[in-house]
Image (cartoon, grey):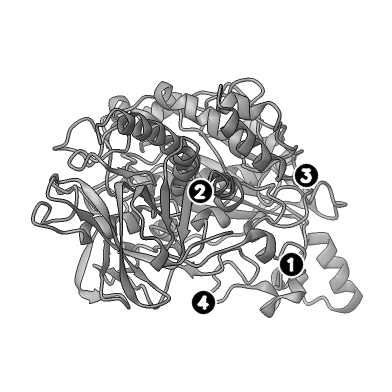
Amino acid sequence: MPMIRAEDATKDYDVIIVGSGAGGGQMAFTLTLAGIKCLMLEAGRGYDPVAETPMFQRRDQAPLLGNSTPDKEFGFLDATVDGGWQMPAEPYTQASDKPEQQFWWWRARMMGGRTNHWGRISLRNGPYDFKPKSRDGLGLDWPVDYEDVEPYYTKVEQLIGVYGSNEGLENTPNSPDGVLQPPPKARAGELLAQKHGKTLGIPIIPIHRAVLTQTLDADRLPAVLFPGNAWAQKIVGDSMRARAACFWATPCGRGCSTGANYQSTTVHLPPALATGNLDIVANAHVREVLVGNNGKARGVLFVDKTTGQDVQVNANAVVLAASSGETVRIMLNSKSTLFPDGIANGSGLVGKYIMDTVGTSLQGQIPALENLPPYNEDGAGGSHFYAPWWLYQQAQALGFPRGYHIEMGATRGMPGGGNPLPDDLGNGAYGSRYKQEARRYYGSFMGFACRGEMIPNDNCFAELDNNVSDTWGIPVLKWHWQWAEHEQRMCDHAELTFRELIETMGGTVRSVTNGRNRIEPGGKIIHEVGGAIMGTAAATSVCNGYNQTWEVPNLFLVDGTPFPSNADKNPTLTIMALAWRAGDYLVDQSRRGLL
């Protein structure tokens, strides 16, 4: 992927985009195809998914059989070539020594950011999810409705390619006919869960994931996305033709050299570069957004990690898309006489209302899945089916607000490096008996995971730690975290649901839970959002419904920071939809001379 050196980024750009993941990639795509000259700054190194994705390596060809290590938490073959929960050069601190009050901050330092690693689960927020406070009085409403975002959900799904089905379930929006790609068949465990889920009233349906089950219609879709713009249609069509349909070879978390997965590096950045309107600088660690005397952003100051030198670049507008925590860090560090507490922070809300997804899980052993022959074990690298939240009509009786969806895993795919036969089931078997028992039990285990909505609270926020700096002398973030009773009760309910489902399937629960410690730590699910929320007024929010900061009209935030709530739906599709919408708005405002 072509990049320029930091010292060559000397011209004045129309827009500087900080971050190359879902929000930054979408913004670059939208703006460059509108003729806007952009500079993208990525804090990590360059990354070429075609050359660097280990799609066809077996686990025995990887160190430690591909198992996780401190610097590769998801294993040697994971696509995250640099980054993780801990990076020695870029530390962060915790306000509390208590583990339950600490936040795990995941960062991907590579071109494309987290889009190289993510689970590709692409769920639309429903109408309820944009107005949660209006429904139950808790948290915050969004300044936009589902109808405002719906056209952009559709455009993103058409561009990146999402498989799934339309089921017409409450607050689980359908896509327009013909937009979704056909979903893959369920695996045996998913079919069994679907059968028994019906007896419990749990709908188990095809999940929506950004994986191509068929090639994109490059002759039709570009004209739908860019009507009347033959130049853009040609560029986008060529990019679509470069992507192959998935042939179910390897786990999606390794990345995808054939482009079947959505990654910013294979979907957004190639056509943006093809316009000739995008320059990219890697290893650019942003120190601050610079402000002119008129109160508008005039550029960015970043550290060139290859030289350690500070570099200033200039533009007419700045877009932050660095992930919620990183965008908060940059904003708080952007102090000036006009903004002594950080840029666009007159409300004092920058860093506040950080959220993650509520996570807990339970595993069971299902005798009905023993000794099964392989059945559709390959496929997309993740679940083919899931259960959207189904108890909206019982909300008052549940004892907690909002809800969760259920992700599930059941497979007889290639085993990892561990013992495939748990000791308690092996019962001392060895030799041919061991092999017989391993074949019997392997694939009979099924896990269910809760992915639930967190209500924003005053105890979850990030601020600068003025006593600790990173390698380049920039103050780091200090995290404050505390789950509320709402989320704890949600996990109680999820555990009971999973136990009932496993037992209804004829299985036995195997996980050992430990009361309130069953909830995953904040940040562990890697769905951090909030920190610079959008709203209807400058006094109670940081940006408006177009991701534009109230106080600095040419500063936009297009990662998860503007989220006023975090529905149970995975946030990436919404980040991209809002970024596309913000891009169109930025172009319109720019052409009207309002930035």
- As helix, strand or loop, the secondary structure at mark 3 comes to helix
Q: Which numbered disc, 3 or 1, marks the residue that appears first in the sequence?
A: 3
The CA distance from mark 2 to mark 4 is 29 Å
Q: Identify residue for label 3.
A: 188
Mark in front: 3 vs 1:
3
Residue 524 rendering spot, x and y as whole percentages? 45, 59
Mark in front: 2 vs 4:
4
The CA distance from mark 4 to mark 1 is 30 Å
Residue 34 rendering spot, x and y as whole percentages? 46, 35
Q: Quadrant of the N terminus?
A: bottom right
Q: Quadrant of the C terminus?
A: top left
Mark in front: 4 vs 1:
4
Amino acid, disc 1: Leu
Q: Which numbered disc, 3 or 2, marks the residue that appears first in the sequence?
A: 3
Amino acid, disc 2: Glu
The CA distance from mark 4 to mark 3 is 34 Å
Left or right of 353 on screen, residue 448:
right
Residue 380 rendering spot, x and y as whole percentages? 71, 48
Vertical comparison of 249 with 436: above or below: above
The CA distance from mark 3 to mark 2 is 22 Å
Q: Identify residue for label 1.
A: 425
| Disc 4 packing (10 Å; few <14; some 14–19; many ≥20) | few
Q: Identify residue for label 2.
A: 495
The CA distance from mark 1 to mark 2 is 23 Å
Vertical comparison of 311 with 563: above or below: below
